[in-house]
């Protein structure tokens, strides 16, 4: 199942979050409230996915390497928002 989720994440992070939620317990173990997952699904999907995948059940938080992956995913999320705004300005469609 893990390989399928990795391949799905290459297509869409949101699709991978849905399949992770449907077929594993990682979402419920990683977040104490479902709201964190919902907010992450809409606003920071790569960060949410990285946090869920690096979450360690025994320690209750990602390891040091896990936090590096979460930070990188956050940069990917932020850069996707910045890249979209830059492309709109380039086209002259800025609001």
Image (cartoon, rainbow, N blue to C red):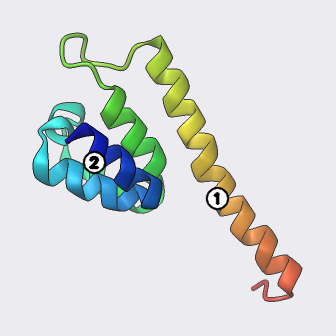
Query: Residue 4, image x and y in percent?
Result: 28, 48
Q: Earlier in the sequence, mark 1 or mark 2?
A: 2
Q: Which mark identifies residue 4?
A: 2
Query: Residue 71, image x and y in percent?
Result: 56, 31
Q: Nearer the viewer, mark 1 or mark 2?
A: 2
Residue at (61, 47) in percent of width and height: 76
Q: How many marks?
A: 2
Query: Eyeballing the image, is 37 above or below 26?
Result: below
Residue at (41, 55) in percent of width and height: 13
Q: Quadrant of residue 39?
A: bottom left
Residue 40 visible to an observer of this rendering? no
Query: Going by the image, does 51 lie left or right of 37?
Result: right
How far, Cα to Cα, is label 1 from label 2?
24 Å
Query: Residue 34, image x and y in percent?
Result: 19, 49
Please identify the quadrant where the C terminus is shown.
bottom right
For label 1, the residue is: 80
Residue 48 visible to an observer of this rendering? yes
Q: Which mark identifies residue 64?
A: none
């Amino acid at each position: 199942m893990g390989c399928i989720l990795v391949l799905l994440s290459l297509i869409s992070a949101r699709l991978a979050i849905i399949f992770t939620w449907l077929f594993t317990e990682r979402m419920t173990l990683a977040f104490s409230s479902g709201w964190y997952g919902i907010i992450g699904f809409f606003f920071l999907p790569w960060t949410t996915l990285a946090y869920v995948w690096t979450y360690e059940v025994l320690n209750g938080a990602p390891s040091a390497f896990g936090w590096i992956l979460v930070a990188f995913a956050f940069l990917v999320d932020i850069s996707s928002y910045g890249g979209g705004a830059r492309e709109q300005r380039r086209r002259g469609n800025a609001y």
